[in-house]
Image (tube, grey):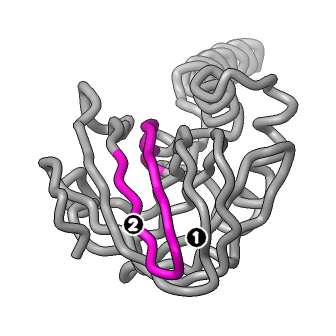
Amino acid sequence: MSNLRLLRAGLGAVLLAFAIASTANAAPARDPRDDDTYSPNEVVKAGSDFFGVTTEVMAKAVEKVFAKYGRPNAYIAGSEGSGAIVVGLRYGEGDLYMKSQGAPEKVYWQGPSVGFDFGANASKSFTLVYNLPNPEAIYQRFPGVEGSAYFVAGIGVNYQQNGRVILAPMRTGIGFRGAANIGYLSYSKERNWVPF
């Protein structure tokens, strides 16, 4: 009987050691989408460094976007200029960042707008990008309604969408532009002075 107990105890110890080793080596369960998306902390840090604002101000600006769309899988950091007298034009350039890509990719954008819109401004633009399958998918037109913008701590945010790809441009800058308009932005690999 004592040999049987010893055999059971030994077998139990081996199984316990195996179970502990297996558990220690197992990776924690993760959402695979998190690997190629940006967390709120990453976006707040990148945006506050880019705009030169505190992380608290940036966190307030991105809170509503994250609540609505979750984690972006890309962002564009750049600058732009725009002006309008009823009909408006906007031109910009920046760098597209994706975790799944190495170096950032240069992106240009331009577009017309029409509506109750007067003034001019120059601004920094930090755009959160959702559902972008690859960098090439950014090169298309994205309609938007500028009057849908909201402002948090001096940062204006609005939304643009084409198919599944959603853009949430955040802007801060100098100048005055009272805007309630509709239009689109067309993203391209090279500067295009024709906005259509």
Q: Residue at x 77, y 62 (%)?
A: 67
**Which residue is labeled 1 in the image?**
159
Q: Position of residue 122 (x, y in %)?
A: 53, 43
Numbered badge on residue 89:
2
Q: Nearer the viewer, mark 1 or mark 2?
A: 2
- In front here: 188 or 41? 188
Q: Which residues are magenta?
A: 73-92
Q: Is the magenta region chiefly helix, strand or loop?
A: strand
- In front here: 186 or 30? 186
Q: Is residue 25 magenta?
A: no
Residue 191 visible (yes or no): yes
Of callouts 1 and 2, the N-terminal one: 2
Query: CB of mark 1 within 8 Å of CB of mark 2?
Result: no
Identify the image quadrant of the N terminus. Answer: top right
Identify the image quadrant of the C terminus. Answer: bottom left
When asked about the image quadrant of residue 78, the answer is top left
Q: Residue at x 62, y 32 (%)?
A: 47
When asked about the image quadrant of residue 104, the answer is top left
